[in-house]
Image (tube, grey):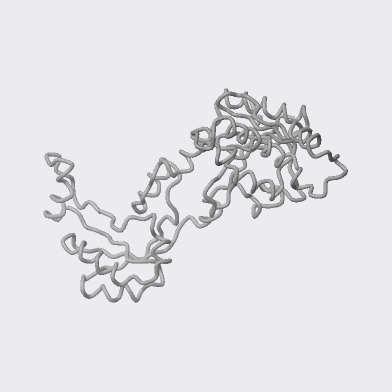
Amino acid sequence: MPSLFTELITSKRNKHNSEERIEVITGMVEPKLCRQLLQDISKLKRNGEKDQALSHLKRVKRHQRRQQDNNISSENREEFEEEHHQVSLEVLLGRLGEEEISKNLVKSYNLRLKRKLVPARSPGSEKEVKEFNAIWPTIYFHKQSEEYKAVERKLSALEVEQMKYGIEQALKFKAAVIIDPVSGCIISKSKDELSLQEKKFKFSLEDRRSPNIYSPVILAIQGVSRLERKGATDLGMDSAGFYKGQYLCTGYDIYLEDEPDVFESMALLHSRIRRVVFASRNLRNGGIGGTGIQTNVNLLSGTNHHYRAFIYTGM
């Protein structure tokens, strides 16, 4: 059964790691000299950007020379093998083009240089760990992998039902609807907030001179703000309830007919919304990718908050 909601995400791998292999220089070294060689490599390195390109790779690859002695415990095996010359060590010296570094070390350590193609990125799954490590040992953090993140992002049946309810409310009322996912209750509707403001300030839709201030997203956020102000008045400025509400929409989800524009998308980021769910793309000035990847406000790397965004595909 196809999913009712599609998450709007960008794969970092596609953006930053289009190359699958990178050419490097390696050198075979005696095990007893390996530690000093690594220290000398670090001293010679001056260009941090070049090091960064290889940060996902381990510095040393072990090559077994003969059959292992199974009587040696695993914690002592590496030390025993090196001491008895059962392994040879291959050290990653640098990327191709850094020959000057390699040449400075060849004579000192009697290195046998090789040119080798190694993985250009860190593994994205357990399967890739095995494939990549067969070429050169890599550094792998499971919780940072695309495989792990995909499992973490998967929506439960309960979440899908709740999101279905939320988007149905937004389409029914033709409004922005903010819902507390813990209680499942509607916290704010943009139409309700607009009605309150029209009565209080005595203006009509035609009188509005700043349409951005009265957009469905902003009105819905103002509705949450109204509740927070009321709570602060009732409970007092020093109460835990008041301080909890300093970021207005922390933990809340918003449901919309249309993708929010850039202004609204940033307002949602500042209010610490948890999820944004909408039914149709805004190709004119959408802020969650409707006008291109450059306007994915929810995926900006330099911000201290990110929210998940979904488009409803069940219509």
Residue shown at the point (49%, 33%) measured from the top left: 240
Which image quadrant: the N terminus? top right
Estimate the x, y position of residue 119 in percent, counting from the top left: 42, 55
Determine whether 141 is above or below 234 in the image.
below
Determine the image quadrant of residue 46: bottom left
Horizontally, residue 134 falls left or right of residue 70, namely: right
Estimate the x, y position of residue 277 in percent, counting from the top left: 66, 36
Of 62 and 310, which appears nearest the observer?
310
Determine the image quadrant of residue 58: bottom left
Residue shown at the point (60%, 35%) measured from the top left: 228
Horizontally, residue 8 falls left or right of residue 93, namely: right
Of 30 and 198, which appears nearest the observer?
198
How many callouts does the rendering have?
Answer: 0
Residue shown at the point (32%, 73%) measured from the top left: 101
Horizontally, residue 91 falls left or right of residue 76, namely: right
Estimate the x, y position of residue 229 in percent, counting from the top left: 62, 36
- Residue furthest out toward the right: 206
Determine whether 266 is above or below 157 in the image.
below
Estimate the x, y position of residue 81 in percent, counting from the top left: 15, 51
Determine whether 305 is above or below 32 in the image.
above
Which image quadrant: the C terminus? top right
Residue shown at the point (43%, 66%) measured from the top left: 49
